[in-house]
């Protein structure tokens, strides 16, 4: 059950990263999915963005690494849960 929840969070993370700032253009039911994912990840991302600044990857181009860190944390949790089930 936990693995399914983490997998859904990972899919939601990819969804909000792909849609980006175009959430207002989504049709039903995708607009509701987007708003739920954004509300969940805003709780995590806002405090992280205060501490972790974007990385400058080019002239006037910054890369927000908070989603990558979130993905890494979710994958580590999924691996830990999988190993716990094996033992």
Image: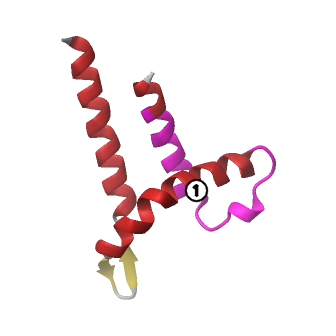
Above or below, comparing residue 9 to residue 82 in the picture: below
Residue at the outermost bottom position: 59
Mark 1: which secondary structure?
A: helix
Percent across and percent down for residue 32 are 72, 48
Report the front residue among 81 and 64. 81
Residue plotted at (36% across, 52% down): 70
Residue plotted at (42% across, 57% down): 44
Q: Which residues are magenta?
A: 6-29
Above or below, comparing residue 78 to residue 42 in the picture: above
The reply to whether residue 64 is in sight is: no
Percent across and percent down for residue 38 are 58, 56
Above or below, comparing residue 49 to residue 76 in the picture: below
- In this rendering, the count of numbered labels is 1
* Residue where numbered disc 1 is placed: 38
Residue plotted at (36% across, 48% down): 71
Report the front residue among 19 and 40. 40
Give the prevailing secondary structure in the magenta stretch: helix
Q: Quadrant of the N terminus?
A: top left
Q: Say left or right for 62 vs 19.
A: left
Q: Say left or right for 47 vs 26.
A: left
Residue at the outermost top position: 87
Percent across and percent down for residue 45 are 43, 62
Report the front residue among 39 and 25. 39
Q: Say left or right for 33 vs 50.
A: right
The quadrant holding residue 54 is bottom left
């Amino acid at each position: 059950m936990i693995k399914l929840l983490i997998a859904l969070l990972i899919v939601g993370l990819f969804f909000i990263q792909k849609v980006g700032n175009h959430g207002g253009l989504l049709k039903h039911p995708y607009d509701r999915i987007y708003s739920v994912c954004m509300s969940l990840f805003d709780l995590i991302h806002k405090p992280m963005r205060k501490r972790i600044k974007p990385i400058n990857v080019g002239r006037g181009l910054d890369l927000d690494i908070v989603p990558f860190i979130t993905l890494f944390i979710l994958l580590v949790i999924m691996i830990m849960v999988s190993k716990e089930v094996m033992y």
